[in-house]
Amino acid sequence: MIPLKDDNPTKTFPFFTILLILLNIGVFIYEMSLGGEGGRVFIDKMGLIPSELLHGRHILIKSSLPVYVNIVTSIFLHASLMHLLGNMLYLWIFGNNIEDYLGHTKFLLFYFACGILATVTHTVVNISSNVPVIGASGAISGILGAYLLLYPRAKILVVVPIIIFLKFIQVPAFFVIGFWIVIQFLNGFTSLGIGETQGIAWFAHIGGFIAGIVLIKLLGKKTKR
């Protein structure tokens, strides 16, 4: 089940949503321009390695940046084109409504706060890991949490693969996002004790999602529009 768009109009132009998408694309293009080995070194330098955060310094690779800066830089890195496209699709569909609700400045603060808390959650669960955690999915998970709280009945157009056919249907946001977060919890807790699986930071998604629910209450309006 892949979301394609929502039926939830906004009143303001999603300036920062678009800017974040462009920044993520720009960083990925630069990453690809470095080549295979150069790209891997770039990810090692700019991604967040949990064991290094635990020690408060870079251990596996030399870098002039404080290790804490990588909590933010890692949010703009992606491992593959599909990783990037999937994240940007979700950011485009759901981010504009949260930016519309919070306002531009608060939305940017919300986005980075969710991304940081998501990365920290992953680090706590995988504290001895030497695998860089990268991607905007933690921050976007926060957007999903906020969207679920604010617009649970908004209609989402999704495509459902059925054998060799594709079926397009509209379903409520609570079904799409609810299904997604259940998958994160199931995979996250079944992966405990066996390390990172499939290259997916399940607990970053869970941490970001919970952060989004909490932060939208703190930063948002007193009443929903």
Image: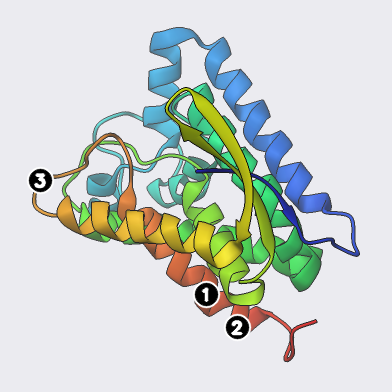
Q: Decide if residue 202 is on the left or right side of residue 214.
A: left
Q: Mark 2 and 3 residues: CB-CB less than 8 Å, in contact?
A: no
**In front here: 41 or 123?**
123
> Where residue 180 sits in the image (x, y, percent)?
43, 55
Determine whether, in the image, residue 155 is placed left or right of residue 115.
Answer: right
Q: Which mark is residue 217?
A: 2
Q: Position of residue 21 (x, y in %)?
A: 69, 39
Which tag, 2 or 3, sits closer to the chain's start?
Answer: 3
Q: Secondary structure at mark 3?
A: loop
Q: Residue at x 69, y 49 (%)?
A: 93
The amino acid sitting under disc 1 is Ile
Q: Quadrant of residue 47?
A: top left
Amino acid marked by disc 2: Lys
**Tag 1–tag 2 contact (CB < 8 Å):** yes
The residue located at (21%, 42%) in the rendering is 196
Q: Residues within 10 Å of mark 2 (few under 14, many from 20)?
A: some
State the mark number for residue 20.
none
Q: Which residue is mark 1?
A: 213
Residue 95 in the image, given as x and y percentages of width and height: 69, 55
